[in-house]
Image (cartoon, coloured by chain):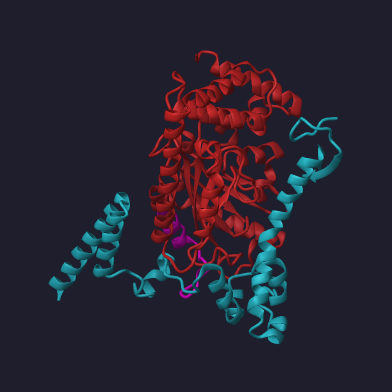
Chain colours: A cyan, B red
Amino acid sequence: MLCDLCGKNQATVHLTEIVDNEVTELHLCEECARAKSIEMEQQFGLGDLLAGLAEFAKGIEPTESIKLKCPNCELSYDDFKKIGKLGCSQCYTTFKKYLSPLLKKIHGSNKHIGKAPVKLAHTLNNRKSLTLEELRQKLQRAIEMEEFEEAARIRDQIRELEKKQNKDENNR
Amino acid sequence: MKTIDELIHHTSEWLKGSGPYSDIVISSRVRLARNLNGIPFPHRLNKKQAEKVLEMVEEATKKIDFLKNSIFIRMQDLDSIDKQFLIERHLISYDHARPDNQRGLVLEESEVISIMVNEEDHLRIQVMQSGFNLFEALSIINRIDDALSENLDFAFLPDYGYLTSCPTNTGTGLRGSVMLHLPALVMTRQINRMLSAIAKLSFTTRGLYGEGSEAKGNFFQVSNQVALGHNEDEIISNLNALIRQVIEQEEMARQNLYTNQRAFLEDKIWRSFGILKSAHIISSQETIDLLSLVRLGVDLNIIKGLNRQTINRLFLITQPAHLQKIENKKLSSQERDLKRAEIIRKTLEAVT
């Protein structure tokens, strides 16, 4: 029997997979089986990596982190370390102390500066909106990078902001 | 559109082979991860709670103008061929095809917009564009996200941004991905250097079918890894700038081959064309590899009388689930290899 994947070599590894109550048999040569197992290992890779990072974060307060549980979904920090996934939005508040350094490790930052849900954006008092000066700098950068589509968008943002500020001044 | 069966008859928007740099960039995609406040993330939901999430999202999407031509699919209503079919069209992930929970899919008619419900996060909103079009995709997804956020209570903290199941997505929840066709960089053996340079800049490279898939043939998907500490525009601008450089490198490599190794290049392209035109049995992997070279031949105007959209369509309809949807029945691997070869022969018949 030839390998199902490459169709070239003799199949020596036989796998049975059950998906949706349907049994599929996979007959693979050694080479493809090895490739497939690497593929499968890699899928687990991210969890392991995160678990490692969480371990690192844990070092800051080891005893408490083991006991701490989210009151909303009951996920413990230990569970998180095992699966690399949080249980609910409240976990972020519960585990804040440990998550902050973890997020910094993953993203190089633990401070969000992007958009907010429309409803919240108003209450956040637009503190995240860029000033005219910042926008002009951004425009300059975009032009230097020859990102003209981006530059055009920033130009429009500047115009809009100028218009708004003029209006505010007139209203004063 | 009422069912996914209708999709087989049209070419997905992103496969049109149009848009900027569509000789090298197949498609541009952005996705946002969003969750509902206070409700456990999908991997911690029981059946009843998961069903509730589906209902809430279905309700919210009905109110949105952008999504008025969309259908709401419950994944458990689909058979395994349908699920595979959606994976092949890049509308759902491998994980979303798993039968372990109540999962849903909002699918807009042109296949530009789709929302996976109860995948790793409650919502995974996706926008796809043909060619190199990241900013357009971002602008569309922002509007959908804003509209959804008026009707759903998204989990958000001012410090951390959008809260996601996996901390790698926390912040913007944004991932931009660009599907690139880089045959000349592969042929000139420069690809590994390119991929390691991309990795050093904290971007990732994946294969044709996203997470966990290996880079098959000459197709590579490049995406950002960082989601926090930059705003959405910056993340997409950075990815955009990186992709521009990759495109430039591929263009140079193509020009180099065309000028200095013309005979070698034409030989490879016409041999691939020859096999596709005459094969009676062909696997899906061989099809991808050979079509890739034929596409290069079309891009370089070596093969005339064939357009990119036809090739893109061939890439898609020769995938296992697509063949079975066309035939409207289950086909064994051997039957598929026969059918696949037949469809390709018929399509290329008129081309010389």
Q: Residue furthest front?
A: B260
Residue B224 in magenta?
no
Image height of B258 relative to B155, above or below: above
The answer to whether residue B112 is visible is yes
Residue range in magenta is B143-161
Residue B159 in magenta?
yes
Q: Residue furthest left?
A: A170
Q: Quadrant of the N terminus of chain A?
A: top right
Query: Image quadrant of residue B317?
Result: top right
Residue at the location (49% across, 35% down)?
A: B15
Image height of B6 relative to B245, above or below: above
Image height of B315 relative to B209, above or below: above
Q: Quadrant of the C terminus of chain A?
A: bottom left
Residue B292 lies left or right of residue B250; in this view the side is right
Q: How many marks?
A: 0
**Nearer-the-camera pick, A141 or B70:** A141
Instruction: Give residue A129's position: percent from left, percent from top.
Output: 33, 69
Instruction: Give residue A96's position: percent from left, percent from top.
Output: 58, 79
Residue at the location (34% across, 72% down)?
A: A126
Residue A10 lies left or right of residue B231; in this view the side is right
Residue at the location (65% across, 24% down)?
A: B340
Residue B122 lies left or right of residue A40; in this view the side is left
Instruction: Give residue B263's position: percent from left, percent from top.
Output: 50, 23
**Nearer-the-camera pick, B258 or A57:** B258
Instruction: Give residue B222's position: percent from left, percent from top.
Output: 52, 50
